[in-house]
Image (tube, grey):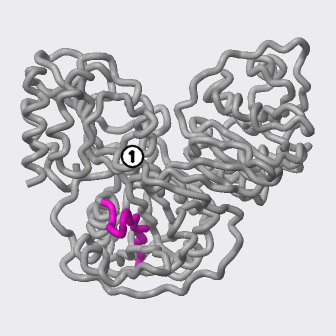
Amino acid sequence: VANIVVPVELRAGVPTCPSLSALAEARRLAGALGATVYALLVVGPEAGCDPLADPLGRAGADKVLCVTDGPAAECPVYPRWRALLAQVVSSLRPRLVLFPAGSVGQQLGPALALDREATFMPRATLAVSPPDAAGGRQLLVRRWNEAQDAQLALVLNGATNGPVARAVITLAARPLAAGAGVRAAELSALATPATTDSGIEQLDADIDPAADAELADTVVFVPRVTARQVPPAAGALPAGALVTDGEVADLLIDACPALVFLLSSRPLPAALASLRLAPDAHLVATGTRRTKPPSPLCDHVWLVDKASAWKLLEAALLERKS
Amino acid sequence: MNVAFVFDPGVSTEPTETLALARTMATTDTGAPWVVACLADAAADPRALAAGLGATRAALVVDPALADVGPRGRAQALAGLLRSLAVDLVLLDGASDGGGLLVPALASHLDARGLNRASAVEHLAGARDQVLVQLRLAGQRRRLRVRLPAVVSLAPPTRPQPTRRLAGDPELRLCDLAALGLSANTLMAEPVVSVSTPFVPAKPRFITTVAPLLRPGRG
């Protein structure tokens, strides 16, 4: 039976929304492939995993692997995670490691893929094929190339037949659907890896004021003048929605939203140039006529009066929240 | 501190903030930073390439076998060269880091610490074998003391910098794969991934409501 491992990111002791949506995605694949979904939790010695078995199980995990490793929990860089990831991967031999959207997957994913001779597919979209004559299914992993003009595709064989291919994947952030799992996950503790000197000491850390940007599932670029009017309402928006006038290029480098709205008729904001999306993400421009959008990357043009676009979108986002 | 700036000629041959940082990090006892790259095109002029970057000294692996090599193979070739230069700190632009793979691949070959997408690298007072790396990661801004040797990529975007005009020609070291004990056959290949031109529905699609796009679930 194939295993899927989802490293769960905690912020203030709570799983991030992209972590929960990655578990839901893993659950969807596991249902089709007959796989088991493992949530990997790395916590410090003062924290526990017990309270998280229920939310992670309801998000889609079959089992929660809890590792108590202070240095790894303090700072998720590969020299501190190498030993524990090696332990997890060698015991479970997962077909897939699915990192949630955010900076952690970009930091740990490539190194893990190299160590395990796996394929690294950042910002990927996953699909399961219909069953073949023998009842086997294949998993299709797709991502854009760097130029965003062609897609790279990786086919993984089904759960029980064919050679085992492995992939390390980072996903897009997605609005969270209702719980994919139905019960608390089974919790098991994994031995703390032997302490090794990683050569990296964290001197200090503080909360990044832009911390939520990298987790955003929906990004709305608005003209600067609108942005000034947005903040009072933006506080009421659902978690995961980021409204910006585009002056946040460096904050969006690690973001991978599933939905991007351009409510500005200006050329694409510079921030968007550094944004990389998954193949099934939607980039929506606005217009009042059926004219060319500001970028060939736009796959939708929302025919709407610009003056009312923000109000309508805000209402739609609030409806999603409810 | 012996510093190298690794660049990808296929991405950019302009001086960047990371190259400027490499100049700041290099100490006088070891000299100017090495500008290092793999070059597959024998017709390219390595001296002009180095001069265009304002490099005081450059070291290049030039071999046609590097034409279709991915980050794993490129790291092998670069690591052979960097080892011969006895480099302590390797800096890369985030845009040239092979999708994040080049840093850990180089770190593995050089037995070094590897960090992707740092926001800054600085000297640490009184510590010649360590650097201070600032990293935005997992919702926190972190300051890390990192022991050398280390390989660090800088988070994009890095803005182009004006080219420094040098009085003389840059010092240039050229080698091919054979000189590094490598060949086309021994370079590591990337796992097989097919490239496809995707089926894209005619776009843009004109829509009058965004509600369906906002439904939770699979976007």
Residue A160 on image: x %, y %: 41, 77
Q: The C terminus of chain A lies in which quarter of the figure?
A: bottom left
Residue A8 on image: x %, y %: 39, 67
From the image, tell me which residue sits under label 1: A209
B83 falls in the magenta region: no
Q: Quadrant of residue B209?
A: top left
Between B203 and B19, which is closer to the camera in this rendering?
B19
Where disc 1 sits, the SS reads loop
The residue that appears at 22% across and 58% down in the rendered structure is A176
The residue that appears at 74% across and 21% down in the rendered structure is B53
The span shown in magenta is A1-16
Residue at the front extreme of this rendering: B125
Whether A20 is drawn above or below B34: the answer is: below
The residue that appears at 19% across and 56% down in the rendered structure is B217
Residue A128 appearing in the image: no
Residue A93 appearing in the image: yes
Between A184 and B9, which is closer to the camera in this rendering?
A184
Residue A317 on image: x %, y %: 13, 44
Q: In which quarter of the image is residue A200?
A: bottom right
Whether A229 is drawn above or below B187: the answer is: above
Between B58 and B195, which is closer to the camera in this rendering?
B58
- Whether residue A125 sits left or right of residue A313 in the image: it is right
- Whether residue B1 sits left or right of residue B70 in the image: it is right
Tally of marks = 1
A13 falls in the magenta region: yes
The residue that appears at 31% across and 47% down in the rendered structure is A216
